[in-house]
Amino acid sequence: MSSAFPEIYLVRHGETEWSRSGRHTGRSDIPLTEVGEAAAGKLAERLSGLSFAAVWSSPSARARKTCALAGFGSGAVIRDDLAEWDYGAYEGITTKEILADRPGWQLFRDGCPNGETPADIGARADAVVEALRQVSANILIFSSSHFLRVLAARWLGLPPEGGAHFVLDTASISVLGFEHDLTEPVIRRWNQR
């Protein structure tokens, strides 16, 4: 299913020890596992034949390594606004551990102490959406799960909290685009592995 309109390919980085164990990984630079590196390498096949006006990556080592193993590292532009959610006091902690101390907590509603709020990450996502609309061409983005989920929500005009309704596996590909014209943003494909 191709489109006459620009498409934004979103790639979540490959597996890390922390993503495998469910630990919140915002600003910590945890390397890819061997499984994560293999999956990142397979992205090259999955993305072959596609052309992009630009390749953007989060500054995290896991996103940059995924980008490089997928064959796009040499032309990638590192953008700080693509960084994963700053989890503050919850960095390296699982949701189960957080809920034991703070029952009812929800990342997309409550944010993180000493970290980012949903409004903070929503503002970063809005800046990326604006940049994407300015370029108006096919773009490939490498980043992390929670940021990409908020980016998808903001692409659709949903509040940042809407990112809670999307799930992303490691080394997955999703595609944002348009339906009938450039005023109708849609999700064309989601969480393809």
Image (cartoon, helix red, strand yellow):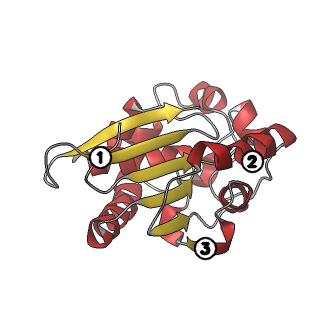
Say whether residue 111 is visible.
Answer: no
Q: Return the residue nearer the eye: 55 or 147.
A: 55
Q: Residue at x 34, y 38 (%)?
A: 188
Q: Which residue is mark 2?
A: 41
Q: Return the residue nearer the eye: 117 or 150.
A: 150
Q: Which residue is mark 3?
A: 75
Say whether residue 75 is visible.
Answer: yes
Q: On residue 70, which mark appears?
A: none
State the image quarter where residue 78 is shown: bottom right
Nearer the observer, disc 1 or disc 2? 1
Q: Residue furthest right?
A: 34
- What element does badge 1 sit on? loop
Q: On residue 3, which mark appears?
A: 1
Q: Return the residue nearer the eye: 165 or 51.
A: 51
Query: Could you tell me the amino acid type at mark 3?
Result: Gly
Query: Could you tell me the amino acid type at mark 2?
Result: Gly
> Residue 193 location in percent, x, y?
59, 31
Structural distance between the alpha carbons of marks 2 and 3:
17 Å
- What element does badge 2 sit on? helix
> Residue 11 location in percent, x, y?
55, 48
- Residues at discs 2 and 3 in contact (Cβ within 8 Å): no
- What element does badge 3 sit on? helix
Nearer the observer, disc 3 or disc 1? 1
- Residues at discs 3 and 1 in contact (Cβ within 8 Å): no
> Residue 33 location in percent, x, y?
83, 43
Q: Residue at x 52, y 51 (%)?
A: 113
